[in-house]
Image: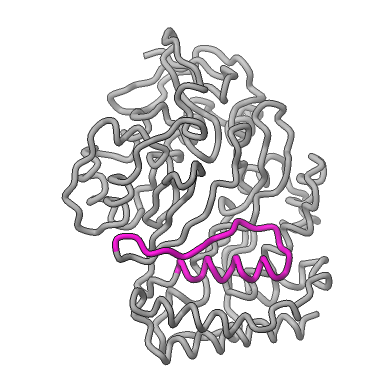
Amino acid sequence: MKCILMNKNTPILLLEYNTKYNTIEKIYDIYNIEYVPLSVYNANKNISKNLVAEVNKWFRNRGIPSWRKNIEKLLENLNVSTTEELLNKAYALSLSDQYWIKEQDRQIEWKDINFFENDFKYKAYLDISLSNSSDKRLNQAELKSPNNTTDGMLQKGWIIENGKRVLVKGIYQPSREEPINEWLASEICRRLDFYHCDYSIDIINNRIVSKCESFVTSDEEIISAYDIYNSEKKSNNVTDLEHYINILEKHNVPDARKNVENMFVLDFIIMNIDRHMKNFGVIRNVNTLEWVRTTPIFDNGESMQCDKLTSEINFTDGKGKFFTNTDKKYSEMLKKLETIREVDIKKLEGIVTDYKNVLEKYQPYTDATSERIRKLCFGLEKRIKKLYEKE
């Protein structure tokens, strides 16, 4: 079937799309190469890359990952065989960008189908996404949803609250502390004036979750740091951080260094272990292709030793992700940051007490022992003190 890959209202590629295997078999024509996803644009400049293969790779990565928690049960309840099959249920639309696929001769417009401006059913999808045992089966109308293109290992789903698109995220680790960690990260960022996505805690179906509003408008898309980093060849005498910042500054992204470095300051405090290069990036305007701003700091749940047993908790140092180095000491990260002295650590006074209160409030949903709460609070206080000493 001939299809057109669109970026909002701009046609970019004419494709042969195999609906049986949900793959792209051929590219017939390139209309507007500059409007393709940056990963595809990068591949098009590289003669060693197969463009069809790269478009397929990008397309598959739009779907729910195969490693999501309880993915087999989710697929069963959605009545599909693979996550790729979901991409054909709602034009492959997302709430992270404006890409979609339509049949070549079909008269349909982005304004009629996008999920930024058109409502969608979400309750049943969310229920089975968060549940480990639901036997509900969704109908075709309920599969027309941006939830088909949510990434990451956490159970999650988009909902609509007061007309706003809100992402609900569940848990992955046995400690069930990820939603509290998202709240903590937001609170730290708010007090330190870091540009961030604001998370709150809620209870849905007797399960603890975090919530955040979409930070992308209907004219924008997220470009990952991974694709940005690989858009230019790095010189051997330039660090990963400087290479990335240099690219952002070439595109006149405001406050690029400050916002990126603040993100790693946060990671130092909460010992975030999951700052991979698709967990930050830049917001691009899909109409003008201008790089408008960095993404706010988001996706901080895998932190505060939530993957550790209580007996294993240790806030002395540890290792996290720092661009291509996925096993870098937090203390070494700080040495790379130029703007750290601008951070007023004194603004975090009282946050340990607030953190303790939240841990105790949601203790029935995490089953954290009093000893674990004590260790976590002591650890947060220790990390803040360590950062204060580094100034």
- Is residue 314 in sight in this rendering? yes
- Is residue 48 in sight in this rendering? no
Q: Is residue 146 left or right of residue 234?
A: left
Check if residue 186 falls in the magenta segment. Answer: yes
Q: Is residue 338 left or right of residue 349?
A: right
- The one nearer the camera, 25 or 49, is 25
x, y (%) of residue 104? 44, 11
Q: Residue at x 67, y 82 (%)?
A: 384
Q: Which residue lies most toward the front here?
A: 162
Q: Is residue 7 above or below residue 155?
A: above
Q: Quadrant of the N terminus?
A: top left
x, y (%) of residue 129? 31, 51
Q: Residue at x 28, y 24 (%)?
A: 20
Q: Residue at x 74, y 57 (%)?
A: 259
User: Where is residue 184, by image quadrant?
Assistant: bottom right
- The one nearer the camera, 387 or 226, is 387
Stretch in magenta? 178-205
Q: Is residue 187 above or below residue 384?
A: above
- The one nearer the camera, 205 or 11, is 205
Q: Which residue lies most toward the left here?
A: 135
Q: Which residue lies most toward the top here?
A: 105
Check if residue 112 falls in the magenta segment. Answer: no
x, y (%) of residue 14? 50, 15
| Colour scheme employed for the rendering of this structure | one colour
Q: Residue at x 77, y 72 (%)?
A: 335
Q: Quadrant of the C terminus?
A: bottom right
x, y (%) of residue 212? 52, 54
